Image: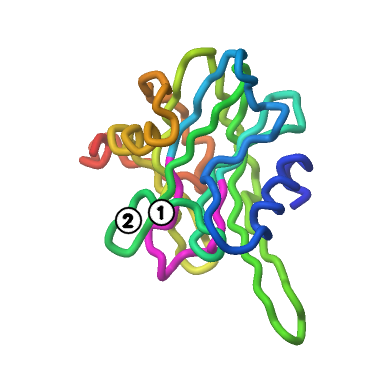
Amino acid sequence: MSCFSRPLALLLMAAALSGCGTQPASLVSEPLQPGPQQPVAYLVGSIGPQNLMASPAPNQRLLFRKRGSAYGAAGVWIGIGRETPQDVKDPGGAASVFVLPLKPGDYEFYDFQFFSANYSPYMGTTYTSVQAREKFNLPLRLQAGKAYYLGEFRSLCLGAQCAFRWRDQMARDEAIARQSAPGMPPLELLPLDYRSAAPYILTPSPTSEETRP
């Protein structure tokens, strides 16, 4: 857990250990939450396993932080325990749509996490955390009064190697996001160069039909 900001780590740990029920797919550190009369920028996307049977962990996170700050936010999928809403269900897989209301400014998408907690009567509870070995850094400039769509991130694993497949599912995810944020401005796709995030984030080739589902 020491690989990312301590305030966000504590926020994520509390969410992971808070028992049964449901929790939102969106986590934002308190200093980054806009007040009632303050400007707001929205960051929207979806996350979850492509295949539940081959899922690397029941708790998956995309990690963001304010540049120059220790505070961050996360888009989360949880499939066991205190589940996030399973907004997308398809053959074999699932995903949750996250809506992060943030104070405008410069942020960065810098890491992901696969997190597991396993209990043994002999060992007690043990925790496993997998993150990027070489951190990527994708800058995000979020302006007040705008809503940005990051994309769909579906986790895939081959043996011990895991990655996210990126796709543009804006029309689908915007309809789901508006159920929790009806006053959100129209989404606009946030173009990021995911080549710097390889091999952790995989994008379709320019000729692929999946470029615009």
**Magenta residues, start to end:** 46-61
What kind of element bears circle 1? loop
Q: Which disc number belongs to residue 86?
A: 1
Percent position of residue 88, x then y: 34, 50
Q: Amino acid at mark 2?
A: Lys
Residue drawn at (65%, 50%) of the image: 133
Q: Which disc number belongs to residue 53?
A: none
Tell me: residue 143, above or below residue 90: above
Tell me: residue 190, above or below residue 144: below
Q: Quadrant of residue 20?
A: bottom right
Q: Residue furthest left?
A: 209
Residue drawn at (47%, 44%) of the image: 201
What kind of element bears circle 2? strand
According to the image, label 2 marks what residue? 89
Question: In this view of the protein, which residue sits in the foreground, 121 or 200?
Answer: 121
Q: Residues within 10 Å of mark 2 (few under 14, many from 20)?
A: few
Q: Residue furthest bottom?
A: 122
Name the quarter where the C terminus is drawn. Answer: top left
- Contact, mark 2 vs mark 1 (Cβ under 8 Å): yes
